[in-house]
Image (cartoon, rainbow, N blue to C red):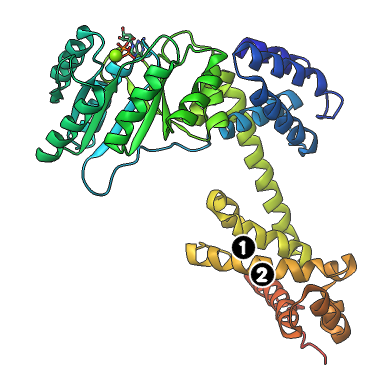
Amino acid sequence: LTSGLEAAWTKLKGEEVLTKENIVEPMRDIRRALLEADVSLPVVRRFVQAVSDQAVGVGLIRGVKPDQQLVKIVNDELVKLMGGEVSELVFSKSGPTVILLAGLQGVGKTTLCAKLANYLKKQGKSSMLIAGDVYRPAAIDQLVNLGEQVGVPVYTAGTEVKPSEIAKQGLEEAKKKKIDVVIMDTAGRLQIDKGMMDELKEVKKVLNPTEVLLVVDAMTGQEAAALVTTFNVEIGITGAILTKLDGDSRGGAALSVKEVSGKPIKLVGRGERMEDLEPFYPDRMAGRILGMGDVLSFVEKAQEVMRQEDAEELQKKIMSAKFDFNDFLKQTRAVARMGSMTRVIGMIPGMGKVTPAQVREAEKNLKLMEAMIEAMTPEEREKPELLAESPDRRRRIAKDSGKTEQQVSQLVAQLFQMRVRMKNLMGIMEGGSIPTLSN
Ligand code: GDP
Ligand code: MG
């Protein structure tokens, strides 16, 4: 996938900007690379569309070449495709949390039971494993051994008892022992078949699990999408675990899970050891797929610089007393965008430190102001004096924006107050009076 994508970036070398025309070829490469990585066709189609839409509309960032910019857009879309954020395991509020593991044979379910127990132990939670693979005596021994390794009890009832019955008994036992988390191992088949699904449905009915996690081998190719869909439709899953990510996987499975099922990948296994289990980070996975960490951090820095330049320009305007409604809107929007932009706000004189309460207030005010400022003519936005002088204009704006005349007057007054405050701050005193609005 990584090398396939490289062809895409190469095609943009020497271009000045991203255009509808010059992204055609690179997008074709991206499409091909994704298909070769076994991402299913509908997923690829939606992905390519989303990236194209963004690429064409994107603004120029000084110093960033179009190919680098496209890398960033593809990265961000990949992250989104995989669910964006980390998805935590859900725990039951009363009684034991029950985790049911399902999946084809050999994907790593039995290993995962113990890995999970080990993982939860570190969070201070006790677990019990239930041996539900009754088809191979070796499977029970395997789980018992793994349980010993991580120091967790394993409930077994031999191979003669139905899995759903074992599940029931195991759950009762866990309740008695006040265990926090019950993890049920199940039998897999080489292929999806009705017997396996029926058995899982029965076990699920008995356990009423908090989490039903589909275990998927990262090496699964094209079939991943169908596999996830089938398990989700038939049994209803709450998420997936991707195993064997330490191998030479092409990553297709990771890209399809969320898109086809709406359910996130929650954890990944990266080796055979008990410690090799960790949360699934969509951004890290995208980084791994693209293999271009340096380009990404470069583009992010450049974007940050651009925001900074925006802020500096704003600062200049403020200092020259030309602060108008366009700037006002910009500034208010900046405050509302707060979260990631603490630094920019810090650069605007007079803003000082912004508290969360102020940010919420700014967000509320923003909608109000936007409506009114949008109802202004471009001339009025640049020359707020026009509004200070003319009640007719203020009345018109109130009417067009659906606000009251008083609200418009307040906004105008606020702008002049802001100008004065800025000027005072800069030590420029002349011309700093607040005009009284004529009636
Ligand atoms: P099950 O049939 O789904 O229960 O799969 P198992 O838990 O028995 O695992 C099958 C094989 O895959 C075993 O040899 C495991 O050691 C191996 N395995 C499981 N998880 C991982 C992993 O994350 N990475 C690697 N490299 N091997 C794994
Ligand atoms: Mg097994």
Relative to 50, say whether 395 is above or below.
Answer: below
Residue 45 position, x and y percent, is 71, 25
Q: Which kind of residue does numbered mark 1 sit on? A: Pro
Q: Residue at x 38, y 24 (%)?
A: 198
Q: Quadrant of residue 196?
A: top left
Q: Residue at x 87, y 84 (%)?
A: 390
Residue 22 position, x and y percent, is 84, 23
In the image, farthest residue toward the bottom: 439
Q: Quadrant of ligand 2?
A: top left
Mark 2, other Cα within 10 Å: few <14 / some 14–19 / many ≥20: many
Kindly identify which residue carries mark 2: 422
Q: Which kind of residue does numbered mark 2 sit on? A: Met
Of residues 267 and 309, the one drawn nearer to the viewer in this rendering: 267
Horizontally, is 331 left or right of 120 in the view? right
Q: Quadrant of residue 269?
A: top left
Horizontally, is 357 left or right of 404 in the view? left
For label 1, being within 8 Å of ligand 1 is answered: no
Q: Quadrant of residue 367?
A: bottom right
Residue 419 position, x and y percent, is 71, 72
Residue 160 position, x and y percent, is 17, 15
Disc 1 + disc 2, Cβ < 8 Å: yes
Relative to 354, say whether 393 is above or below.
Answer: below
Of residues 432 and 341, the one drawn nearer to the viewer in this rendering: 341
- Asked whether residue 304 is in view, the answer is yes
Q: Residue at x 69, y 42 (%)?
A: 306
Where does the C terminus fall, quadrant-wise?
A: bottom right
Task: Report helix, strand or loop for mark 2.
Answer: helix
